[in-house]
Image: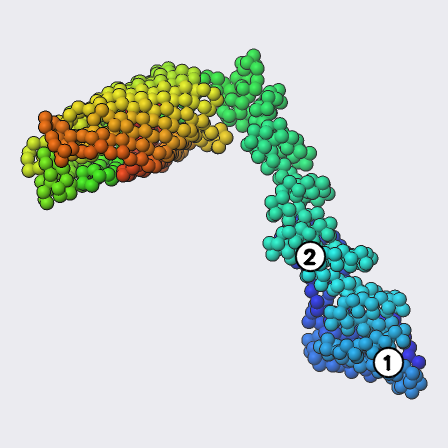
């Protein structure tokens, strides 16, 4: 009779990936250690299969056990058998050989014993290939023999063939007949194999059924591992499904976050306070909410977010500061006073905190606050300085506050040099016009007055008129007999004075000393008045018309030393801008002047423009001084069309009507920083009407062939300007600009660069040194 013994079965031959773990930073560093489970541990896949040896030992089959052990040693020379296996073999050698006894005395079980001895003696590769009919006979005989070892051997064989359902059945029968840890391990591995197959197919109902059917086996970790595989493959929806199935909170939070469902992720994270990583995630979420809510002016909600952070951890300095600002802007002045006092204690020189504290505290407390906080004292003493600074009166600002942000006007003598150019394309020939300028200058400040002297050098270039085109006193022959450019020098001097609510400016120029026509002095006078809610400015001027070589400089008649051109405009322009509401302003500007030149008939010009603007700087960034945007509409016109290049004309664009409407925006970054940028865009649509004009308006008679016909046109128009300046060192400043304009049959590009040296120590830059902000260019001083 076969003697049955408790069987110890090793599971090292199992090579499936059902127990493999996915290792990621998320699973360990960010999420925390995994929970310890009773999941079976799998030995290395290169260990030999000792199932057959253990089977023969359990059946007391000495010869078969020795043969199987010797075969494994021959196939795996580096194999180190376990101590348990060596001891079991040694114990078996000391007992009588029962192989013959079984053969002689118990022939009724010989076919089954022989069948299972044959199965146990097979190698791992052979057991993988055992056919179904063999295993069916073995299952029948195991059921008939009611032998736990037979069922266990079949279970391992089915497990090897990945027939997990059959393996589960065999291990269950073995466990009923002879309970053991080995049978439980086998059943567990078979169930995990079933689950692994369902996980790979994404069969959620099947996964749930397996977990419910085998509730005694911990399967959540396996489901979680499958979720990590999807997570690492960037398949966050599937990962979330598996993390939810396994009730793995950390994984759910991470997957939801990657899916952009931050609110849901935070809801889960904040409901779990036992994990530090989830507490940190919850706090980070509320920190982001605090900032986002503040940015959209939801100050009460921002404060609620700050309270939620405090329930988890202490506020960071940035969060503490943001809470103080939210308290101020939500009207919780008592709390804001306490918060900003604490902030000023840690940052005693912070002017922003001082301003906020003064805004929140009653005026009766200002004196005591000034005694306690130096920043508050500085702020109160600098009221006038701030007003001047906001009005761009930087000379006055420096006079009012010795410790204020320095401006280049406080640094003593300044020397500068620069170059600029313009390329204009229009009508063929003289309608194309290039200007190249170079300059070197010196400037200084005396109290509230700034003076400037500059030497200019200019090169003017124009296209040559095409043959048969009109120029001078007739039509051009094949070879143009006039000039297309020249170069010359000039002088510029200016003075600027600032007083409370008033800025005055004046300049005098004398340029192109040796141009064809006699050079004439030019200049302008400007004044700007400030009030609490309005700005008024006026500019009186006599300036060159820089549309063409003929208008800006002059030209000779063909094959003659007689010159004409040199057009100047003389007149007045003004601007009035009023604040209608917070950040909203209405501006109206107008111009009226007269154009005159040598052998060029006089012409009158006028125009008006209306702008509505809204300042979005507060909503955009705290690094922006202003960002205005809004619509505009404008009109300008000339009494006569003097756009030709013949005697009596001036070579400048002079439509009878030019209507324009569109959108204007302008942005300036903060004053006093190491760098500054100013950008503006005009985009709109133009309607142009040019009236008929005599080809030779200086003549008393003309014919139809000598008439410039009337014309109309329309189209998109725009202008983009970008200016900037950067403080290279405490004494050196570089500034530049680029400008692009286009309209109907017209394009122009401007660019300039300037290097400036200050004798004193510069702490920052201000917009008055932006090149196009120069009153000599803009006409206004603000």
Left or right: where does residue 704 sit relative to residue 90? left
Quadrant containing the C terminus is: top left
Percent coordinates x, y for residue 375 in the rendering: 50, 22
Q: In this view, does 741 lie above or below 40?
A: above
Quadrant containing the N terminus is: bottom right
Residue 43 image-quadrant placement: bottom right
Which secondary structure, mark 2?
A: helix
Number of numbered discs on residues: 2
Percent coordinates x, y for residue 529 in the rendering: 35, 16
Which secondary structure, mark 1?
A: helix
Q: In this view, does 23 lie above or below 681?
A: below
Of mark 2 and mark 1, the one earlier in the sequence is 1
Q: At x 47% / y 20%, what residue is drawn?
A: 581
Residue under label 1, please give it.
112
Percent coordinates x, y for residue 384 in the rendering: 42, 17
Colouring scheme applied when the structure was drawn: rainbow
Residue 646 image-quadrant placement: top left
Residue 719 visible to an observer of this rendering: no
Residue under label 2, please give it.
225
């Amino acid at each position: 009779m076969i003697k049955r013994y408790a069987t110890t079965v090793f599971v090292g031959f199992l090579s499936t990936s059902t127990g493999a773990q996915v290792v990621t930073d998320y699973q360990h560093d960010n999420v925390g250690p995994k929970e310890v489970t009773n999941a079976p541990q799998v030995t290395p896949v290169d260990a030999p299969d000792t199932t057959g040896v253990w089977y023969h030992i359990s059946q007391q089959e000495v010869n078969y056990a020795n043969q199987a052990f010797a075969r494994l040693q021959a196939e795996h020379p580096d194999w180190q058998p376990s101590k348990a296996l060596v001891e079991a073999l040694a114990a078996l050698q000391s007992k009588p050989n029962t192989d013959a006894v079984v053969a002689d005395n118990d022939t009724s079980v010989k076919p089954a014993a022989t069948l299972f001895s044959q199965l146990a003696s097979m190698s791992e590769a052979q057991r993988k290939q055992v056919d179904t009919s063999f295993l069916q006979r073995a299952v029948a005989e195991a059921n008939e023999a009611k032998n736990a070892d037979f069922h266990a051997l079949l279970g391992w064989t089915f497990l090897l063939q990945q027939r997990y359902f059959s393996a589960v059945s065999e291990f269950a029968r073995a466990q009923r007949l002879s309970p053991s840890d080995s049978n439980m391990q086998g059943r567990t591995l078979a169930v995990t194999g079933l689950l692994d197959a369902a996980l790979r197919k994404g069969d959620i109902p099947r996964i749930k059924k397996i977990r419910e059917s085998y509730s005694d086996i911990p399967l959540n970790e396996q489901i979680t591992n499958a979720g990590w595989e999807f997570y690492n493959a960037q398949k966050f929806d599937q990962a979330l499904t598996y993390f939810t199935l396994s009730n793995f909170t950390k994984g759910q939070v991470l997957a939801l976050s990657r899916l952009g469902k931050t609110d849901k992720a935070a809801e889960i994270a904040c409901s779990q306070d036992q994990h530090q990583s989830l507490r940190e995630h919850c706090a980070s979420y509320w920190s982001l909410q605090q900032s986002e809510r503040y940015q959209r002016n939801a100050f009460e909600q921002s404060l609620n977010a700050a309270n939620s952070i405090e329930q988890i951890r202490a506020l960071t300095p940035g969060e503490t500061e943001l809470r103080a600002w939210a308290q101020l802007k939500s009207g919780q002045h008592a709390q804001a006073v306490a918060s900003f006092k604490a902030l000023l204690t840690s940052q005693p020189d912070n002017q922003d905190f001082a301003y906020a504290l003064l805004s929140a505290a009653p005026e009766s407390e200002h004196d005591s606050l000034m005694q306690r906080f130096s920043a508050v004292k500085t702020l109160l003493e600098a009221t006038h300085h701030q007003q001047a600074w906001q009005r761009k009166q930087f000379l006055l600002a420096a006079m009012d506050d010795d410790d204020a942000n320095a401006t280049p006007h406080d640094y003593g003598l300044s020397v500068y040099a620069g170059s600029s150019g313009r390329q204009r394309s229009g009508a063929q020939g003289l309608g194309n016009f290039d200007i190249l300028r170079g300059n070197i200058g010196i400037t200084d400040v005396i109290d509230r007055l700034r003076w400037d002297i500059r030497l200019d050098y200019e090169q003017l270039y124009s296209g040559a008129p095409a043959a048969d085109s009109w120029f001078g006193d007739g039509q051009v022959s094949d070879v143009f007999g006039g000039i297309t450019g020249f170069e010359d020098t000039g002088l510029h001097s200016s003075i600027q004075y600032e007083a409370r609510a008033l800025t005055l400016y004046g300049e005098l120029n004398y340029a192109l000393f040796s141009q064809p026509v006699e050079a004439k002095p030019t200049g302008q006078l400007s004044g700007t008045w400030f009030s609490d809610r309005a700005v008024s400015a006026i500019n009186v001027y006599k300036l060159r018309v820089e549309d063409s070589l003929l208008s800006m400089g002059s030209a000779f008649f063909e094959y003659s030393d007689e010159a004409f051109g040199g057009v100047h405009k003389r007149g007045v322009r003004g601007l009035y801008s009023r604040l209608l509401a917070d950040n909203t302003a209405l501006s109206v500007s107008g111009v009226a002047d007269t154009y005159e030149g040598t052998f060029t008939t006089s012409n009158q010009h006028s125009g008006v423009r209306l702008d509505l603007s809204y300042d979005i700087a507060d909503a955009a960034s705290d690094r922006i001084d202003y960002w205005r945007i809004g619509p505009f509409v404008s009109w300008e016109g000339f009494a006569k069309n003097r756009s030709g290049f013949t005697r009596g004309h001036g070579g400048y664009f002079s439509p009878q009507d030019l209507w324009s409407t569109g959108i204007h925006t302008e942005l300036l970054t903060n004053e006093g920083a190491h760098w500054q940028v100013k950008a503006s865009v005009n985009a709109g649509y133009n309607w142009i009407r040019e009236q008929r004009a005599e080809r030779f308006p200086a003549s008393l008679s003309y014919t139809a062939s000598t008439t410039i016909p009337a014309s109309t046109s329309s189209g998109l128009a725009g202008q983009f300007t970008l200016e900037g300046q950067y403080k290279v060192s405490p004494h050196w400043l570089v500034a530049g600009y680029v400008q692009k304009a286009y309209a109907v049959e017209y394009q122009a590009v401007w660019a300039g660069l300037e290097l400036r040296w200050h004798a004193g120590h510069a702490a920052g830059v201000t917009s008055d040194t932006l090149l196009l902000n120069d009153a000599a260019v803009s006409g206004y001083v603000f």
